[in-house]
Image (cartoon, coloured by chain):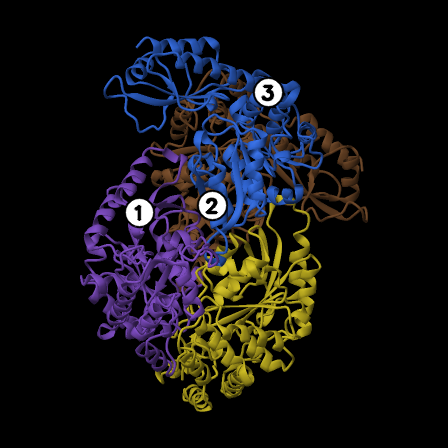
Chain colours: A yellow, B purple, C brown, D blue
Amino acid sequence: MDFASDNASGAAPEVMEAVVRANAGYVPSYGADDVMERVTARIREIFEAPEAAVHLVATGTAANAIGLACLCPPWAAVYCHAHSHINADECGAPEFYTGGAKLVGLPGEHGRIEPGALVRALATAIDTGVHNVQRGALSLTNATEAGTVYAPDALRVLAHAANGYGLPVHLDGARFSNALAHLGCTPADLTWRAGVDLLSLGGTKNGCLGVEAVVLFDPARAWEFELRRKRGGHLFSKHRFLSAQIEAWLADGLWLRLAAQANARAAELARGLAALPGASLVHPVETNAVFAALPRAAHRAAHEAGARYYLWPATQELEGPDEDPLTARFVCSWSTTAEAVARLVGAFAAA
Amino acid sequence: MDFASDNASGAAPEVMEAVVRANAGYVPSYGADDVMERVTARIREIFEAPEAAVHLVATGTAANAIGLACLCPPWAAVYCHAHSHINADECGAPEFYTGGAKLVGLPGEHGRIEPGALVRALATAIDTGVHNVQRGALSLTNATEAGTVYAPDALRVLAHAANGYGLPVHLDGARFSNALAHLGCTPADLTWRAGVDLLSLGGTKNGCLGVEAVVLFDPARAWEFELRRKRGGHLFSKHRFLSAQIEAWLADGLWLRLAAQANARAAELARGLAALPGASLVHPVETNAVFAALPRAAHRAAHEAGARYYLWPATQELEGPDEDPLTARFVCSWSTTAEAVARLVGAFAAA
Amino acid sequence: MDFASDNASGAAPEVMEAVVRANAGYVPSYGADDVMERVTARIREIFEAPEAAVHLVATGTAANAIGLACLCPPWAAVYCHAHSHINADECGAPEFYTGGAKLVGLPGEHGRIEPGALVRALATAIDTGVHNVQRGALSLTNATEAGTVYAPDALRVLAHAANGYGLPVHLDGARFSNALAHLGCTPADLTWRAGVDLLSLGGTKNGCLGVEAVVLFDPARAWEFELRRKRGGHLFSKHRFLSAQIEAWLADGLWLRLAAQANARAAELARGLAALPGASLVHPVETNAVFAALPRAAHRAAHEAGARYYLWPATQELEGPDEDPLTARFVCSWSTTAEAVARLVGAFAAA
Amino acid sequence: MDFASDNASGAAPEVMEAVVRANAGYVPSYGADDVMERVTARIREIFEAPEAAVHLVATGTAANAIGLACLCPPWAAVYCHAHSHINADECGAPEFYTGGAKLVGLPGEHGRIEPGALVRALATAIDTGVHNVQRGALSLTNATEAGTVYAPDALRVLAHAANGYGLPVHLDGARFSNALAHLGCTPADLTWRAGVDLLSLGGTKNGCLGVEAVVLFDPARAWEFELRRKRGGHLFSKHRFLSAQIEAWLADGLWLRLAAQANARAAELARGLAALPGASLVHPVETNAVFAALPRAAHRAAHEAGARYYLWPATQELEGPDEDPLTARFVCSWSTTAEAVARLVGAFAAA
């Protein structure tokens, strides 16, 4: 009954086996391994992007922050959702890697940037000369921090607003596979065809040990990315262990199968929770996270039964009147079982 | 016959098995795994340092650069060997993480800083007021880039010179286990008892997939290290896979056995090469690297036989008069076999 | 009729004469001039702060950004008003000097931070571990960007909220003298007695050529300030020309007389504008700036008469229906004459 | 008898008068003053560079560091003389502004980079991939820190070596006017015709209060310079006081007359000192600085007579055997009198 985060799950067996296989013998280091060549070819094929540059790092924060640093200068404003991971959960990594850019947190329901808010932010930044930071980049997250998705059209609207000012678009795809599994569109539709310039394609949360592929649809800044990666300490000497993870993860649609499993468990969980007395869903459940309000007494019962998940925000208290609703986040992973979901719902129902 | 680098080798079976074992079930993320607690306890025990703080990252560059950033401010001079990894092989990562410190490359034979050079550099930095960078930290490497070691007394002489000005001492221990295996002293003797404040303890090159333990003997800056690690994108969500590597590597003396194997192969190789006509060793062979000068014709023969290693410096050319000596670096790893060594010597001897 | 900014005015005659006098002969450079010693003594006396460290720079942005960098680390959240100069008008200088801190823009009417907003921001930052930036510093502005002031009690409320979390308080005093002239309290009451740790005391806008005194009430970080100033290129070799300005400006209460003059002109202007048909004041007029809404036709008339000032925000257009109100900012300086004020009011009245 | 530095001198009367004149009335701020337009036109004319962009800052460190940041990325190696101001006297300002570039200090007699040393440094940086900093820029100083000059041909040799690798060339011209006065060539010959891309043209040390003109012969990076200047806190609101200095300084050849005066005094001083028993010149005297070795007893006599200058290096001691030679630096300024030179020589001669 661990619903704290998909990053508390392990690696899929296929991925772990690939890591074990990759261990044989001597292999050129620092990304010169043969597997990496195949990974690049595979990602170009999947994304219908024969020119794209592909580089691997081990964490999502590195992928996002190094990617953004390649897209905008230190004096940039980076437009993002107020609750986006880059703004709220990376301890200022984007500021560090960009050399001090300013993240402009925008509002929007259910984790999605409200297009009007972006348009207003861009428009009011007009003509300030050197006196403030300059429009720099747009950063989107798909699936969002609220577990919702942007469909290709929704991405395109935001990307177009940014492109109108010449801004590039970064996509934090820590849960890109979950969004893709939900939407059923092509990877190209959800990235470069919708205006995305650089994608952080997350493997870690969905069945890998620790690997993210950074896909630069415009390879012009690929060398800069490599230098920033090295300088940030993110170039692995035994790089084969990163390559092997991604290769196995993308093989035979594994990444999408794992994502679909996680999404399906979340849908079940949402149905189960929504049916409980006094319960309600906070955000539409579109991928692998469920945000729900439940009576405090139900939370206490679940905690006593050993359920692991976060009250969201974490400042809420388990002590207090039974009937008060507390909101919580439940994240399913590729390895969450239907049985665990049923037990969790049962624990809440027991209250 | 791959002698290009110890980082082209794989992981030891015990370490890989631990990674596979660590994959079971849900585990708290971001370093809150149980294994990490045991790792900290074990390192404190091995180093006789019950107060030490221990944190893991995946690369040596991250360990060095984040560690240095905790030891000195942006306006610091960091004294190091001119050929040290932080100065010559990290694309300016220390400058990046410190916010622009200045690395002062010092001379010294066989990769070891000449104490007089350090003393002079420290003394001539006196009393410059705000007009130049301030004395900041001493960074040592053991084993050195030349494959030699500092014995505890040699470390102490340099550390004392730095301490006289209030400077802390960083130790790049990417091959610390190789140095320790050679010297046969205690880990404490080779670190805090000799004046080291912060150690980058390298697992990657000696049998791990990718993990380095940063040991802060003075835990006062441990929280700062954690923030800098996160901000640098180096905090793993599935941290258990780092913890598991180090735990297995330190268990039952595995780390020292692996290091001793690599050192033994290098000693054999050194003997074999030194006996060849026209050959000579460039540095004393004390750990797992052999630097040797051999006639160009011998290099050509070895390359044709499929030997992999680097001419050092790489600007030398295989084309030219047969008898000219070319210098090269050969690195043995924990997995280098006696048979591979014999074949390499044989390939050179064939010329 | 130039009301664009107080920084478009010249230097007061007393200040310019002091600069000319300071030109005589050879004088030790880099702040070792005798005048600087007297300046430090004088500021300590005026602020009843015998331990304070005092350093000069030539611009307000430098004073603010270097000061903030001394108060908080790169991973800090700096709480400030959303419209504060450091957040909206310095092109990210605080981000640059701090190494990438995150400015958290807070709301509040009339340029003053709403205390509840500060308290909520501080409280909701609780217990996020390393995952987001850490509470770092509070930055206040007095007089505010809206021309209003914080009285000592109002400062104290905000400073206490920050101090409760151990945060230091920076005060952007680009128009500190105007605030002081309005309030009639002591400099100590408006700074350290109210919880301010570091003051940027602005001379430039109020009668100097270009000089700001940074006053560190806690001198512990004074040396760091000096290093950051030098490293930022803000240590003047011919420092005497900075010292001389401040000395003359503080002599015989000149700074407060100049501020009072500017404030008096703004009060006259406010009265004059408020009496016009269709006009209203946007903010209370407490120092030397007037924010007023006036019919578009009146603005057109004033522009044709040669009046200089900014529509605020600048995105408003002079073209459009006559009766629409446009808001504008009018800034008086020490050199604004009553006659210029009368002419400006007359120009608006003519419409 | 003050020979400590040219920056201990005052401003030339013509420059001070211009500053006083510039004080009249309201003037647009932040560089939009009319004088600045004339300054740009004048510098383009003098340098025969009709496209050049010109921007002013108040210190040489700002001019150098911001300029370098526009020429190379954070992962750059900046090749410069080991004793250059940017490497030895700016507290790491270039590292700060570039975001952590690495300054590579090159040897060379009399303050001039030895061309072979540059060529070797460039050549040995070949083909290191991402593992070390990349060749970034060449920074030259003219006149050098040793008071010597590079003639156009000497500049061209070094610039060509850099250009061969695509590197831009920065020229620290803190004493450019002294070099020009010595050589008698055109400003164009000593800058862009010799391969210089960006010049820091120093007014401060030679008759101004505090102003340096940054001349970008390739204006492509002019906007970036403006943003970096603002972000560094170096954009003056009352910019007219910078413009006025440079305008007066460049009018009617004043800058070259002042430089010629300073150079002439240094030549007299060199002749006087060289004639003393036990004395010798350390560097050729080509501009306004004299480096000489004199017996310790002579130094003691001069100090007792009130002479001000620096022993160079400053670690030498006045206490010790009389006959030991101590080396010293004597700097003449535009305001140094022939009488002061004679008195200084007399003071040494008295010993």
Query: Disc 3 designates what residue?
Result: D256
> Which mark is in front, 3 or 1?
1
For this rendering, which residue is in front, B204 or C115?
A: B204
Please determine whether, in this image, residue A89 is positioned above or below residue D303.
Answer: below
SS assignment at label 3: helix
Indicate the quadrant containing the C terminus of chain A: top left, top right, bottom left or bottom right. Answer: bottom left
Q: Same chain for the residues at labels 3 and 2, yes or no?
A: yes
Query: Disc 1 designates what residue?
Result: B108
Mark 3: amino acid: Leu
Q: Distance between the residues labelled 3 and 1?
A: 47 Å
Q: In which quarter of the image is residue B330?
A: bottom left
Please determine whether, in this image, residue D26 is positioned above or below residue D259.
Answer: below
SS assignment at label 1: loop
Q: Earlier in the sequence, mark 3 or mark 2?
A: 2
- How many neighbours does mark 3 have within 10 angstroms: few (below 14), some (14-19), or many (20 or more)? many
Query: Disc 2 designates what residue?
Result: D121
